[in-house]
Image: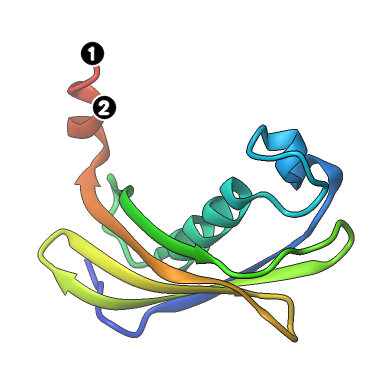
Amino acid sequence: MSLVPGLCATVSLTVSDADTAIALGSGDVPVLGTPRVVALCEQATCAALAGHLDPGRTTVGTRVELDHLAATAVGRTVHAEAVLVEVDGPRLRFDVRAHDGDTDLAVGSVRRVAVDVERFLGKLR
């Protein structure tokens, strides 16, 4: 496993009606819903780790702290950036930021833990 601070990635989303607070059940306005912002930031953390995990390993989210700062209209493109800032054994902490090119929409951190897939899934059986 080659997980070192500094790994980073950016993912993008053009906001559709399916991404709104109304569609996600998290509000009653047709703007990008907070749950979709959280998912986009987590997607960026996964992208930052792509190719850096040993076979049979993955990460799972354990904590998200996010300040959703501004509304985003349908049709706008949002970019979520994640930077791995701390590696403590299997525990990983990322700084995340979502923006539309002009405005910061959300900032915060995401924590993930590296796990063995088979062992992790075996606990569910």
Q: For residue 23, which quarter of the picture?
A: top right
Residue farthest to the top? 125
Amino acid type shown at disc 2: Leu
In the image, residue 15 above or below residue 10: above
User: Residue 52 placed where, x, y %?
Assistant: 34, 67
Of residue 61 and residue 36, the one placed in the foreground of this image is 36
Amino acid type shown at disc 1: Arg
Residue farthest to the front? 28
Mark 1 falls on what kind of element?
Answer: loop
User: Residue 73 placed where, x, y %?
Assistant: 84, 61
Give the spatial CA distance, label 1 vs label 2: 7 Å
Residue drawn at 44 percent across, 78 percent down = 8
In the image, residue 109 above or below residue 85: above
Residue drawn at 57 percent across, 46 percent down = 35
Write down the residue under mark 1.
Answer: 125
- Position of 97 compared to 83: left or right? right
Q: Tell me whether the residue at label 1 lies in contact with that at label 2, contact meaning CB atoms closer than 8 angstroms.
A: yes
Mark 2 falls on what kind of element?
Answer: helix
Q: For residue 121, which quarter of the picture?
A: top left
Q: Residues within 10 Å of mark 1 (few under 14, many from 20)?
A: few
Of residue 24 and residue 56, the one placed in the foreground of this image is 24
User: Residue 108 placed where, x, y %?
Assistant: 42, 70
Write down the residue under mark 2.
Answer: 121
> Looking at the rendering, in which quadrant would you find the C terminus?
top left
Residue farthest to the right? 75
Q: How is the image coloured?
A: rainbow
Residue drawn at 84 percent across, 50 percent down = 16
> Looking at the rendering, in which quadrant would you find the N terminus?
bottom left
User: Residue 77 placed where, x, y %?
Assistant: 79, 68
In the image, residue 102 above or below residue 81: below
